[in-house]
């Protein structure tokens, strides 16, 4: 079966990296299907690269790749990772009561737009159980009410480890994950925030937007970091509004932006199109 | 010659206002060309209305209108103003060194898109003198260097009064007008801010945007009030950017957004399409 | 229970219509919540109006309205209709195999975005039965295979009549309704066409778009008329694409445009915001 | 002085091209600043590549490059061209009476957004002479009135050759260039068409759009070919309109789209970011 190999690299910029990497691929008879590069800002620019290589004809097996590539990576000081399109990432979705982002992700997943496995959805409420299982995905209700947040988060972490999750998506999960959770959980987490950050950080952004009288509202998908709403931004979307749009209209219009922005961000992440450069992201669309 | 009469009203909302006003117009044989209404938020909703009436056949002369309309206005507690399309507003433009907004306004004005008289452009630099006079508009150089800001602002105020200016447009005027100026100058001032407010208030918004790693940049046209960048917003525009866009690219892309957003806001103001509702604006497009 | 009364009018334009209608409402103690007007193009301009009136305090009961309003309507030569927000329109959805528009409509309907009753979904395939019934909506499979199109359409028409349908939505229904059906079925039908009409009329618009090398694709919601893809347009949406987007990518991107454009058009129709002016539509947003 | 070298390639796709080209650059001590690749559609996919190389340290002089690169190019069957950022392209602009695109291009050029030399503007009218010379650009009035179109086009061609023009921009030039001119003139010509092609080909697209009742209007920048409005599309832009926008409003809104779309297309062309793939374009943004 034919699949593609994705090689993602970043390292200090200097001459000859593209030549070195592409020659390495050519040496092993690999066909490069797509290649993207980007060089960051001075004074110490970093080099970012993403390659898609056809599996057919490529001479390095999965178990051989690391050993063969390591000397080159060491020589150029590379961070690198390789992934294989026939082993999609395993994704968990955390939700609360609002289902628009969850349902949209599940629908796109069924339609083949999201290349992932989704072993489970976790929620602090049980409202979306039926919507989840209707798509053949397991739903885990992990309320906070019956215990401490610490315990709830420990149970969530257990579930994530047990199911070997590669990516956690907060699809309007309305609790703030504790610093302890974030410190100890080592995989990427994508959140959708319902404002065009950094405007309206924190609670009730649509109300804040209404009170300020803005003419555009938006949503932001970002990686979660310890600092609230301050992680690297993957994608943002906006819509024009008018004086006729009250807070409820903004909520309705916002749902549309949120689900589109989150789905696009998740899609890019799943296809290894996102690299981080400090608080900025490099997106190889 | 045929022209249109624009009647703009706001008052506490209650039954029968539309009937009262439109019957008043009908009584005087006026033909309503367009009518817009909006009712604000509870608990004390305000009613906003804009009418365009054809001058042909309308029985009330300019000098008669106020006396005829006053009783109705008093009865409903209205703020109201009337303007006549054959007497366009007189607009002054303040600029510094960057000319993109100025040139765009002047070009649109020549193309007939902005229904105004523009008796003068005022600048704290002399860079844009030639660009201004090429359009047949007087250019006044009012530097701050040779004196205090207070003196400079006094001279600007004198010019605005002398030329009977109805609207001041800050087309990337890079000085902050003093509270004394703003307190004492009673006509509307529109500013273009180069971020999608309230994100990136203050200086160097594009640098701030780059450092935060946002994926969308924007610009905001707002009325100037004593609090910096906090006045009622007339219009906002945005553009998507990518990691490839450095600060200079943002500046270039931003120029395009700024000039478009400012021109649209000015256009709406000149046509009496903007009413303020506290810090919010009602725009009857 | 409080609800709103929507009055929609069109007639030849002349002086005093707004005064007449708003005075009629005031006479019966009605509170106008929103009012929109539009006057069409010369030489014989038509007047279009939409009012929302609060039921509370309004002195005309449902059964009394027509008799009370008829003389005014006759005098001004009005087409008019009145609807009541507590009696939402009854909508049927026709689909084939692709579910994105159907699922989006049903999801929005459950979220309260679409003010309608949806007694049934009809399809020439059975693929979407489960998706439909999961939302508590009856699914009717009406294949063409076992008989003639004429018979199938007769059965569809029977279902529409039986369920007293006010609006038919073709949510990617891939069969062209026969002229006989369209001639004899008297209620509005909204279709979503997957191109920005009038470009790429007919089959396979995304393939046509790819072959032409366009940089923007779109979708169009329109009322169905006897002439294919030529009915009045309610709404259009677009997305930028690049050379990297093949036909499959366009199909994916297009799904997003289609569902958003169709939902918006249906929403406007359900709220009586759409009036037709020949092949053009007046949309009171 | 430091500049960049742009190498643009297309050839049949096969393994090892990136390695071959990047190794060639590395061999001559070149630093690749940016690299873009694209592989076209099966069954006979073509490979497209654009490199920017820093001049500093690069071991191949301008006069040496062709000889050194030719064997590689021959081996892979490449079309290729190289350009140097310190030798910007020479661009001529053709206009008629409407100045918005011309003025916008000249303004951007002065602001440093367009990396070109503009030795002359040619027009069949004299309306825009002053606007052109104000920017220090020569204006040539070449009316058709006093002679045949053939003679006028011959004079235009003479001017283009005399000034060693690399790119001709039709900035709302309202005459259709004859097949004879297009056959014999070998350099690229970019036109701005005031509709979102392929909708509304031919004359008066805004009137056509109004009559059809569309809700979106647009503009298209394309290379001129013998078949009217059918050349490869570089860029398209759109704007939403409403029933309130008559033909004149569309013309006004359209001016804004047209100037933006044309400027972006010209900018990409000047920076060698556009490759053609039959009637499609590959744009390396």
Image (cartoon, coloured by chain):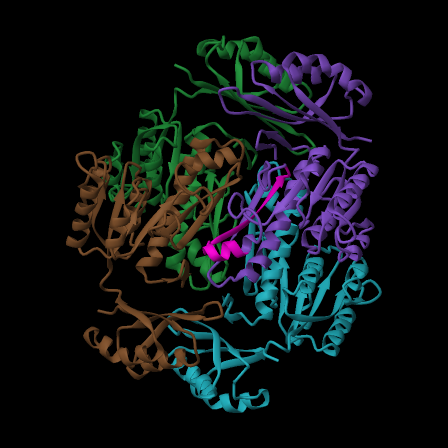
Chain colours: A brown, B purple, C green, D cyan
In terms of depth relative to the viewer, which is nearer, A147 or B146? B146
Q: In this view, does D199 lie above or below C116?
A: below
Would residue C189 be visible to someone looking at this image?
Answer: no
Q: Where is residue D64 in the image (x, y as percent from the top left)?
A: 56, 91
In the image, residue B9 lies at what x, y percent? 65, 23
Whether the magenta-drawn stretch holds residue C85 is answered as: no
Front-lying residue, C105 or C1? C1
Residue in front for this viewpoint, A173 or D229: A173
Report the residue at 52% width, 85% height from top: D58
First to last magenta residue range = B207-225
User: In the image, D50: left or right of D182?
Assistant: left
Residue B112 spot, x, y in % from top left: 74, 44
Residue furthest toward the front?
B148
Magenta segment: does it hold B214?
Answer: yes
Q: Position of residue B264 (x, y in %)?
A: 64, 43
Q: Quadrant of residue C187?
A: top left
Q: Quadrant of residue A55?
A: bottom left
The quarter of the picture where the N terminus of chain C appears is top left
Left or right side of B78 for D151 = right
Name the residue nearer the viewer: A64 or C80.
Answer: A64
């Amino acid at each position: 079966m034919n699949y593609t190999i994705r090689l993602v690299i970043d390292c200090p910029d200097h001459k000859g990296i593209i030549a070195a990497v592409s020659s390495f691929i050519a040496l092993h008879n690999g066909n490069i299907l797509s290649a993207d590069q980007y060089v960051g800002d001075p004074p110490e620019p970093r080099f970012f690269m993403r390659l898609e290589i056809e599996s057919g004809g490529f001479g390095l097996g999965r178990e051989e790749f690391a050993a063969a590539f390591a000397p080159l990576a060491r020589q150029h000081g590379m961070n690198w990772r390789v992934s294989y399109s026939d082993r999609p990432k395993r994704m968990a979705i955390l939700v609360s009561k609002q289902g628009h982002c969850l349902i949209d992700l599940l629908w796109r997943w069924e339609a083949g737009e999201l290349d992932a496995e989704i072993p489970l959805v976790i929620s602090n409420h049980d409202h979306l159980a039926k919507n989840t299982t209707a798509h053949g995905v397991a739903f885990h209700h992990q309320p906070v009410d019956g215990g401490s947040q610490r315990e709830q988060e420990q149970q969530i972490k257990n579930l994530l480890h047990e199911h070997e999750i590669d990516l956690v998506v907060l699809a309007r999960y309305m609790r703030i994950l504790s610093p302890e959770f974030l410190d100890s959980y080592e995989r990427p987490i994508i959140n959708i925030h319902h404002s065009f950050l950094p405007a309206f950080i924190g609670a009730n952004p649509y109300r804040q937007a209404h009170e300020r009288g803005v003419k555009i509202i938006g949503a932001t998908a970002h990686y979660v970091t310890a600092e609230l709403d301050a992680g690297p931004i993957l994608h943002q979307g906006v819509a024009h509004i008018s004086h006729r749009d009250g807070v409820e209209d903004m909520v309705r219009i916002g749902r549309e932006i949120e689900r589109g922005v989150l789905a696009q961000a998740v899609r890019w992440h799943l296809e290894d199109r996102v690299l981080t450069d400090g608080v900025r992201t490099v997106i190889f669309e």
